[in-house]
Image (spheres, grey):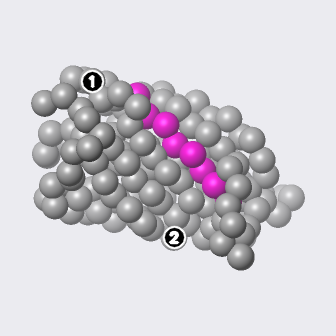
């Protein structure tokens, strides 16, 4: 079936995505959680703690990458046939601002879902104590079902 952004995510697919996410040791270690799962989109959030910090007091770029990669990957998985899993083939990141605040929030979305490959994007934002957000990283990549 061709991909269209107005499709509804079947409950079984959302459960499978949440179960898959729960098995990720890195996401668990970083205290990441799923805020939203929809067809072709996901939103993840993690606290910015010393455990994911770097020497200047910002969240490490690796934390932004990992969260964005997972958000984009689960967005891709939401468009794949039931029973699929997903792997990243390649992912590019642009770091556009230091990641400071209380949380990192990653919004993953599918740009093009093909028969075999999906092109994805994620925007990672830093959320301040007052709830305001600023973009800190942009990712774009390609996913494949495994």
Quarter of the picture containing the N terminus is: top left
Q: Is residue 83 left or right of 31 when viewed as pictured?
A: left
Q: Which residues are magenta?
A: 119-126
Q: Nearer the viewer, residue 63 or 9?
A: 9
Q: Is residue 66 above or below residue 80?
A: below
Q: Nearer the viewer, residue 23 or 72?
A: 72
Magenta span includes 86: no
Quarter of the picture containing the C terminus is: top left
Chief secondary structure of the magenta portion: strand
Q: Is residue 26 left or right of 144 when viewed as pictured?
A: right
Q: Is residue 95 above or below residue 28?
A: above
Give me the disc on residue 31. 2
Q: Is residue 38 visible?
A: yes
Q: Nearer the viewer, residue 89 or 3?
A: 3
Residue that badge 1 annotates: 114
In the picture, residue 21 is in which quadrant? bottom left
Q: Nearer the viewer, residue 7 or 116?
A: 7
| Residue in the picture at 19% in, 42% down | 84
| Residue in the picture at 57% in, 45% down | 123
In the picture, residue 19 is in which quadrant? bottom left
| Residue in the picture at 71% in, 76% down | 130
Q: Is residue 68 above or below residue 54?
A: above
Image coordinates of residue 104 in percent, x first then y, are 61, 61
């Amino acid at each position: 079936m061709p991909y269209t952004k107005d499709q509804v995510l079947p409950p079984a697919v959302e459960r499978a995505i949440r179960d898959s996410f729960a098995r990720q040791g890195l996401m668990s270690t970083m205290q990441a959680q799923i805020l939203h799962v929809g067809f072709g989109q996901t939103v993840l959030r993690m606290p910015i703690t010393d455990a994911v910090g770097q020497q200047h007091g910002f969240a490490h770029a690796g934390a932004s990458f990992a969260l964005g990669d997972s958000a984009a990957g689960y967005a891709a998985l939401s468009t794949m046939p039931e029973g699929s899993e997903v792997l990243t083939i390649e992912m590019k990141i642009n770091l556009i601002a230091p990641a400071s605040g209380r949380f990192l929030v990653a919004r993953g979305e599918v740009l093009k879902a093909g028969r075999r490959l999906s092109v994805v994007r994620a925007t990672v934002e830093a959320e301040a104590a007052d709830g305001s957000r600023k973009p800190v990283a942009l990712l774009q990549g390609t996913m494949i079902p495994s």
